[in-house]
Image (cartoon, rainbow, N blue to C red):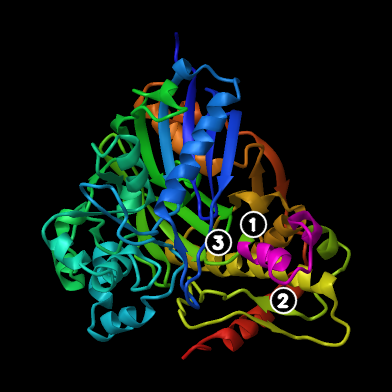
């Protein structure tokens, strides 16, 4: 029986999904499972690694039971994942020694300040392309080794393994036979040399991390191993696991940004803007991050990245914590019912500010409140805050790269908001290009897995699949745009250094 499909496992911050794509890049079947978020202390965020694994397995079982695809026709499985989230487990038993420390978690902020005080900032930026921040995996690993009883001793004996979520899933799906990651995930640990393409011994020694814990680093598109039998999903036993890639570079690939200078923004829990910079790294002058987007066929593609930690999560906050809206679409309806935010500015720095500010101690604020402000204006200010953050990032990216973007490709759950995409186009002065298939993250992993197993021949064939749903064209007067953006900058300054 011919191979017609690829299954992508999209393991995100709040849910796990299994999506099956056909050769045209169309969704044939999908399933989703949410899992718990844990907040043990202020600024701490954790997941249960086994809940992550079980949510993935349940999604696989559900998508196979849909009956829309014969499992024998699945050519391969690709994995894309929340990056930086850190899991350490026992090599023999497979049991995690602690909960997964999530990318959003700020518990190692003070230690990051110590590293800066030691003068390591330049070395880390030159070697890894990153800035010192609690966001990345390295300090999270150190925290686990320092704070979990017996963990450091076991690690030094070679009895513990570290992995980002891709590594954890591949290790479990292969029954512990494969301990790997790809370049895009490795480069987010603050331990990986993105020029030499290897773990950096000096950084591992400085952070006290035994290199025996670290996974082998491989290309993003290659066969890592095969799935073993699990109850309810024995139909895919023997199917090759043929890609692993972090969620944001996966969306860049899924959006067809194969050429230098092409960019995409994903509106998910956070917002992530990436630009393909080709086979050479660009060192940012604007506090953006330099990383590896993917590795294919012995070639490395680099990227520039800027992130806003809170985007879609702010709309969820409006719904679940503040209870101002009953559903995400209601936020759009309310925001569209007013012409502007009535002078209100909202800075969603719930877990600090990412690029270009990198302020771990910033906190959210709402400023410009007057008696005339109502919940419609608050909803509008929330949507505007997401687009303002992206404007910060896009301006920094164009300055660093010297490339003037004409087109920004968008995806992610919140990209369905017409009003927000129009505000984004107005604020950036760039056409916002939204595809028919908004599952770009999962699609990127599927394409990479399909390339490794021959379902697609090359990126030219993949590029032909992309279909545009809508293009949002800037229409705001430049004077109004500049006034709004200037006030946003003022609001950001009010939010900074709050926790010091």
Residue bearing the label numbered 2: 484
Residue 403 image position (x, y, % from top left): 49, 58
Which dot, 1 or 3, sits closer to the camera? Answer: 3
381 left or right of 338 in image: left
In terms of image quadrants, where is residue 268? bottom right
Residue bearing the label numbered 1: 430
Q: Looking at the picture, tell me which residue is in the foreground, 376 or 139.
A: 139
Residue bearing the label numbered 3: 270
Q: Secondary structure at mark 1?
A: loop
Does any portion of residue 253 appear in the rendered image? no
Q: CA distance from mark 3 to mark 2?
A: 22 Å
Region of the chain picked out in magenta, as a range: 313-331
Q: Secondary structure at mark 3?
A: loop
Residue 69 image position (x, y, % from top left): 55, 19
Residue at left offset 26%, top offset 44%: 180
* Secondary structure predominantly adopted by residues drawn in magenta: helix
């Amino acid at each position: 029986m011919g191979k017609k499909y690829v299954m992508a496992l999209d393991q995100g911050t709040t849910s796990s999904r299994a999506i099956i794509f056909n050769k045209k890049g169309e969704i044939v079947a999908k399933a989703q499972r949410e899992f718990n978020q844990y907040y043990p202390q202020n600024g701490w965020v954790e997941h249960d690694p086994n809940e992550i694994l079980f949510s993935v397995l349940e999604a696989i079982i559900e998508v196979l039971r849909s009956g829309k695809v014969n499992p024998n026709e699945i050519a391969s499985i690709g994995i894309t994942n929340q990056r930086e989230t850190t899991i350490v487990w026992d090599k023999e038993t497979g049991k995690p020694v602690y909960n997964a420390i999530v990318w959003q978690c700020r518990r190692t902020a003070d230690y990051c300040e110590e590293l800066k005080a030691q003068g390591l900032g330049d070395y880390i930026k030159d070697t890894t392309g990153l800035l010192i921040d609690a966001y990345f995996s390295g300090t999270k690993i150190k925290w686990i080794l320092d704070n979990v009883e017996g963990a450091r001793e076991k690690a030094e004996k070679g009895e513990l393994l570290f992995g980002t979520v891709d590594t954890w899933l591949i290790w479990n799906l292969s029954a512990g036979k494969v301990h790997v990651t790809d370049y895009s995930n490795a480069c987010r640990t603050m331990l990986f040399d993105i020029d030499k393409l290897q773990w950096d011994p000096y950084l591992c020694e400085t952070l006290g991390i035994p290199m025996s814990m670290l996974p082998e680093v491989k290309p993003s598109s290659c066969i890592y191993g095969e799935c073993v039998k699990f109850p309810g999903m024995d139909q895919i036993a023997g199917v090759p696991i043929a890609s692993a890639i972090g969620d944001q570079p996966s969306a860049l690939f899924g959006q067809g940004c194969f050429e230098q200078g092409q960019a995409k923004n994903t509106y998910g829990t956070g917002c992530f803007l990436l630009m393909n910079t080709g086979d050479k790294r660009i060192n940012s002058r604007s506090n953006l991050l330099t990383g590896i987007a993917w590795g294919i066929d012995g070639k490395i593609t680099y990227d520039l990245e800027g992130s806003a930690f809170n985007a879609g999560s702010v709309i969820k906050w409006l719904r679940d914590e503040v209870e101002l809206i009953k559903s995400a679409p209601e936020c759009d309806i309310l925001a569209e019912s007013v012409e502007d935010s009535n002078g209100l500015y909202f800075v969603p720095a719930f877990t600090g500010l990412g690029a270009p500010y990198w302020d771990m101690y910033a906190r959210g604020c709402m400023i410009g409140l007057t008696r005339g402000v109502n919940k419609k204006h608050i909803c509008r200010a929330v949507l505007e805050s997401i687009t303002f953050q992206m404007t910060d990032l896009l301006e920094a990216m164009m300055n660093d790269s010297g490339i003037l973007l004409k087109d920004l490709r968008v995806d992610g759950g919140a990209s369905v908001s017409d009003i927000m995409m129009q505000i984004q186009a107005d604020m950036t002065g760039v056409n916002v290009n939204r595809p028919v298939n908004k599952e770009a993250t999962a699609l990127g992993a599927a394409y990479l897995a399909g390339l490794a197993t021959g379902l697609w021949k090359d990126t030219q064939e993949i590029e032909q699949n992309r279909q545009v749903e809508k293009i949002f064209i800037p229409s705001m007067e430049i004077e109004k745009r500049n006034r709004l953006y200037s006030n946003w900058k003022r609001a950001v300054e009010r939010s900074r250094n709050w926790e010091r």
